[in-house]
Image (tube, grey):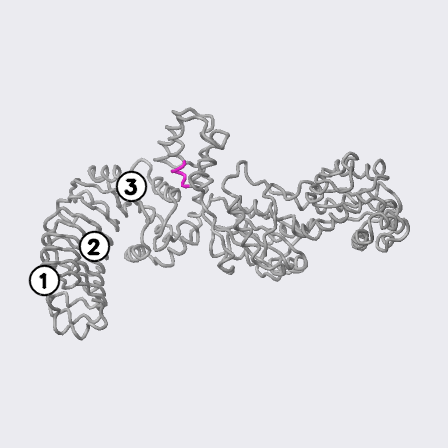
Amino acid sequence: MATPAINLESSAWEYDVFLSFRGETRKSFTNDLYCALCRAGVRTFRDDDELRKGEDLSSEFKRAIRSSRIAVIVLSQDYASSRWCLDELLQILDCKEKRKQTVFPVFYGVEASQVQNQSGNYGVALAKHERRFGASKVQTWRDALTKVGNLSGLDLRDAAINGNESKFINTIIEKVQLVVGRRVPMFVAKHVVGLDSQVQHVVQLIHREPNDGVCMIGIHGMGGIGKTTLAKAVYNRLFGYFDSSCFLEIRSGISEIENLQEELLSKILKREIKVGSKDEGIVLIKQWLQAKKCLIVLDNLEYINQFNALCGQRDWFGVGSRIILTTTEAPVLKSLKGEECYEAKVLNQKESLQLFSLHAFGEPSLPKEDYIELSDDLVAYCGGLPLALEVLGADLFDKSKEEWISAFEKLKRIPHNGIQDRLKIRYDRLLDDHTKSLFLDLVCFPYEVPIDTAISMFEAMGYSANIEIQHLVDKCLINYYGSQISMHSLIREMGKEIIRLESPDKPGERSRLWCLNDIHDVLVGHKGTTGVEVIVPNTAMKNMRYHTKAFKNMKKLRWLQIDHIHLYGGFNYLSKDLKILQWNHCPLEYIPSDFHFEKLVSLDMRGSNIKKFRASLKYFRCLKSLDFSFSKRLKETPSFGGAQNLEIVSFRACSSLVKVDSSIGELERLIRLDFRDCPKLKKLPNSLCQLRSLQILDVYNCTKLKELPKELGNLIAPLHI
């Protein structure tokens, strides 16, 4: 189905009404009608005598007809005597067919049957035309008059009007206002940038559905990305093509379904509707809208029960209806087909700079060269989010360069309230504190994280990771980017600000620490408290030394990343609740015997300086993952006795490794074992043959490993070696 050529403007129509009439009524009835329409605020096109020159309709006349929502045709006694009027009529009926123009015939001093059958003055006039223009041309006029005569129109001689022209004009205006009143375009935005392609994409999705079907389109995305703006622009582009249209803005916090049903019906039917219950509302929507071709936008749907009560079934609406939904709640759209869902896009760098400049300088291009670098930095900070670009741009309008610099420095530490409050709405509506906690853990990552890695880490910390991560995706707080979990930079900043506000002036009392300065201050000053649960530096803390006593008061610490850091002192000071310990590039040569953590699930010591791991793994009864990859000085594996829950063990690229402890055969749940690129490893213990759970054994490029244990042959087939 071809997409109709409709201008993307605030309205699909330049005029509300085009008046078609014969000159005999210009200074009487038509003039009174025109003046009354203008007083009523109806944009009306009435021709000028000067335009009626030549044999054919001027291009201006044709454009005026095409650009009018309604055509009011004043069919007077002499209407058919004018070839201009008859050509106007052909153009109007063409627009009625192709552009869904509304046509109101007004029978002024003639009967509808005269027009239908071309009798009386109409027959005489057409007979004269036939002698001048030929039968073929006149037949097109006859057909047009028959069609317009058959339309439901207004007759001055109706009993209710009884020849009263003033009353007649008021009746015409009432009918016009019924159409015009529901055709008010939505205000889109003060400055619209980067919207055309998205509007076109949504319109194309809408037109994939045949005319005799009912199409639903869901627009989803994070808060502030411009879903409402996009929906308004699409609505303005299409609303003139429907019998009825409604843009329903669902305000946050309104939970009474009946109120929303009343508002929807009242807007479409143009009268007050009362709904006694949700079920009654469903019946009324179906009863009154089933025969109407509607364009309906339900903006900011939050709950599935709103969807079910307002547009739960497509057969509630007339053929050709289009329903557009916007939401940050992906589950609301679960009944839509995949091709009916559209994810709103952030602006690219060029569009972002243009929108920011419009708000900051009042024009789309930068007027001051010395602001370019600052503007680029601020635009990059906004990450293409229209909300942020508009808020920051407006705040910086008419400010000095020094104020810009100061504002940007503050943004690096504290997010803007106007942005923070909008984005935080989604966080506040998360199901429970557990999901909120997982989200706050995620914001500590300074980068995208593989989905599998995130799930295993969060499962290790006691989360129901699969369902809770999906819930964050559904809330548009995170999304999947290939095999990664990604988060918009401003969403991340929003989460970090929630954590900062736990204790604005005392980082040691916050639940999570990621800033190097804060971590250093807490560890050096031994300022950590029981409130600290996570320490994950956003960059490496190389060449730093801290006494383990710095962790003494952090009794609830469950996730600790101390890459490159040199810890000294007894490890008994570290939290017994620790679930994840990441100590890549550990500078210690030996891990002491008091290094044990009963609840630890993952120990990651890649690239360490360790020669020997002296701690007994029997004190790591919950450990599932152990990684010493790239620890080039490690000569032998630890004893595995007692670590019955280990599933993944890696010694990849441990170039000095020569001995694998035979206790490895006691790991009944071991799934993956990695010795790839261990060039000095000569043999594997026979105890490996006891591992019935082992699925992957990687010994690639172990150049001195000439053979595997003989009894391992029975397991080789199911193993990936």
Q: Is residue 497 left or right of residue 28?
A: left
Q: Which mark is residue 509?
A: 3
* Secondary structure category for the residue under label 1: loop
If the image is split into quadrants, where does the C terminus sit?
bottom left
Q: Position of residue 307 (x, y in %)?
A: 55, 56
| The quadrant where residue 491 appears | top left
Q: What amino acid is at disc 3?
A: Glu
Q: What amino acid is at disc 1?
A: Lys
Residue at the location (84% across, 35% down)?
27
Q: Which mark is residue 603?
A: 2
* Secondary structure category for the residue under label 3: helix
As measured in the structure, the alpha-carbon distance from the residue carrying label 3 to the one carrying label 2 is 26 Å
* Looking at the image, residue 256 lies above or below residue 26: below
Q: Position of residue 220 (x, y in %)?
A: 48, 51
- Which residue lies under the disc numbered 1? 704
Circle 3 packing at 10 Å, graded few (<14), some (14-19), many (20+), is many
Helix, strand or loop: magenta stretch: helix
Q: What amino acid is at disc 2?
A: Leu
Q: Is residue 626 left or right of residue 359?
A: left
From the image, state whether disc 3 or disc 2 is nearer to you.
2
Q: Position of residue 348 (x, y in %)?
A: 43, 42
Q: Position of residue 683 (x, y in %)?
A: 9, 65
From the image, state whether disc 2 or disc 1 is nearer to you.
1
Residue at the location (60% across, 45% down)?
236
Does residue 271 appear anywhere in the picture? no
| The quadrant where residue 280 appears | bottom right
